[in-house]
């Protein structure tokens, strides 16, 4: 067990453990590992999108109250709506994006195994033209 007061060492140790465990999961169950990453990425992107879109908007102001100390309290309705959007995008990432990407890149690898730079360039072209137009 790591005992230290240095937050950088603690963060680094945690990151190493997390990456090691992710590598094990990616080798044993790649679709689950990709689903976790896509779920996290999509949920985080939606969280940031809500923060950017709602910043200064009328919708954000109608769902918030400025307290006496200057802090902002949000109504439960706006909070629930935000959480449902984040949950929806997390599900899309885990159940739609990850399986599609897993199958698509598996198909590309089957079609053109990466042996030469021409193979890699053709897979990139196929991905850009068909997989993600």
Image (spheres, grey):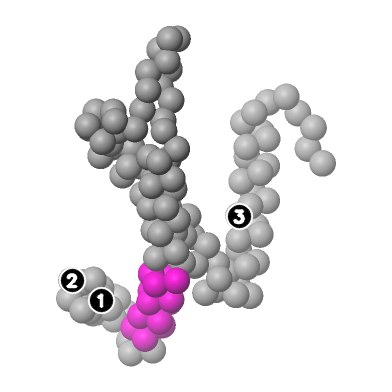
Evaluate if marks 2 and 1 touch, with contact meaning CB atoms under 8 Å apart. Answer: yes
The residue positioned 68% from the left and 51% from the top of the image is 17
User: Along the horizontal axis of the image, is 109 left or right of 58?
Assistant: right
Magenta region: which residues? Answer: 95-109
Which residue does the numbered mark 1 point to in the structure image?
Answer: 131
Which is closer to the viewer, label 1 or label 3? 1
Which is closer to the viewer, label 3 or label 2? 2
Which residue does the numbered mark 2 point to in the structure image?
Answer: 133
As drawn, the label of residue 20 is none
Mark earlier in primary sequence (1, 3): 3
Residue 85 magenta: no
Query: How far apart are the two marked residues, 1 and 3, measured between alpha carbons?
Result: 28 Å
Give x and y (percent) for residue 103: 40, 82
The residue positioned 62% from the left and 37% from the top of the image is 11
For disc 1, the neighbor class at 10 Å (few under 14, some 14 to 19, many from 20) is some
Mark earlier in primary sequence (3, 2): 3
Which residue does the numbered mark 3 point to in the structure image?
Answer: 19
Q: Using the image as rendered, state which of residue 96 and residue 74 is in the foreground.
A: 74
For disc 3, the neighbor class at 10 Å (few under 14, some 14 to 19, many from 20) is few
């Amino acid at each position: 067990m790591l005992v230290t007061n240095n937050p950088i060492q603690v963060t680094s140790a945690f990151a190493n453990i997390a990456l090691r465990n992710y590598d094990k999961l990616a080798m044993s169950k790649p679709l689950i590992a990709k689903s976790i990453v896509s779920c996290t990425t999509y949920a985080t992107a939606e969280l940031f999108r809500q923060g950017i879109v709602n910043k200064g908007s009328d919708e954000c102001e109608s769902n918030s109250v400025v307290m006496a100390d200057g802090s902002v309290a949000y109504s439960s309705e706006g909070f629930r709506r935000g959480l449902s959007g984040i949950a929806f995008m997390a599900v899309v990432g885990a159940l739609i994006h990850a399986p599609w990407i897993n199958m698509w890149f598996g198909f590309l690898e089957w079609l053109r195994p990466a042996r030469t730079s021409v193979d890699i360039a053709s897979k990139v072209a196929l991905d850009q033209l068909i997989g993600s137009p």
